[in-house]
Image: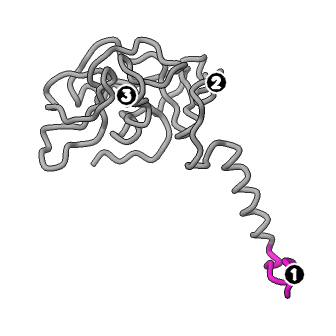
Amino acid sequence: MRSINEVRPKSGWLVAVAILMMADTAMGQDWSRQFVSAARFKLLEDFDYEAALDRETRLVWEIQPLGSTTGWQGARNHCLGKEVGGRLGWRLPTIEELASLVDPDELAPALPAGHPFLGVLDGLYWSATNFSGNPFFARVVNFELGGTSSWSKVDTAWVRCVRGGSAYDG
């Protein structure tokens, strides 16, 4: 039987991969891990405590959303121009990202107990995701009941912006 030293390349890539794997797990990149409510979100000092890191998804969410409803294009523009804690780079979340906030065991709002969000209003929140088959509709999340549906882009809904991830608004 060969030892690990005999099969490991001399370049040290194995050590680098192991370090990266440990760092990802330490940073919450273990996608099989579900955080308990109290530990899931971390308020971010670097964002003047106006944003929170979701340790489960590694997304950064604004704490206080837009205080009024708007149409879909207005929601996209709002997030693109958003500045939170002196930082730009915000966007409208995809339907998957927005729905990841939903706790099916909670109602009005359908968010995890102990969440850090302020100004959570019951109702529909825009996602960046178009409704397949109809370009005049986009996907929304209902934070009162927790479900997802489609909504006409000319109608209005609430907005919560996100930062990070790899968005696709298809």
Residue in front for this viewpoint, 70 or 31: 31
The first of marks 1 and 2 along the sequence is 1
Report the amino acid beneath label 3: Cys
Report the amino acid beneath label 2: Asp
Figure colour scheme: one colour
Where residue 46 is drawn, which disc sits there? Answer: 2
Q: Is residue 47 above or below residue 9?
A: above
Q: Crowding at label 2, few (<14), some or many (≥20) Cα neighbours within 10 Å?
A: few
Where residue 79 is drawn, which disc sits there? Answer: 3
Residue 107: x, y in percent? Answer: 37, 20
Q: In 3D space, how far apart are the residues under numbered discs 2 and 3 (Cα atoms)?
A: 19 Å
Q: Is residue 5 magenta?
A: yes
Magenta part, dominant SS:
loop
Read off the magenta span: 1-11
The first of marks 2 and 3 along the sequence is 2
Q: Left or right: 77 with respect to 29?
A: left
**Residue furthest front as drawn:** 105
Which residue is found at the position 57% from the left and 30% from the top? 53
Quadrant the N terminus occupies: bottom right
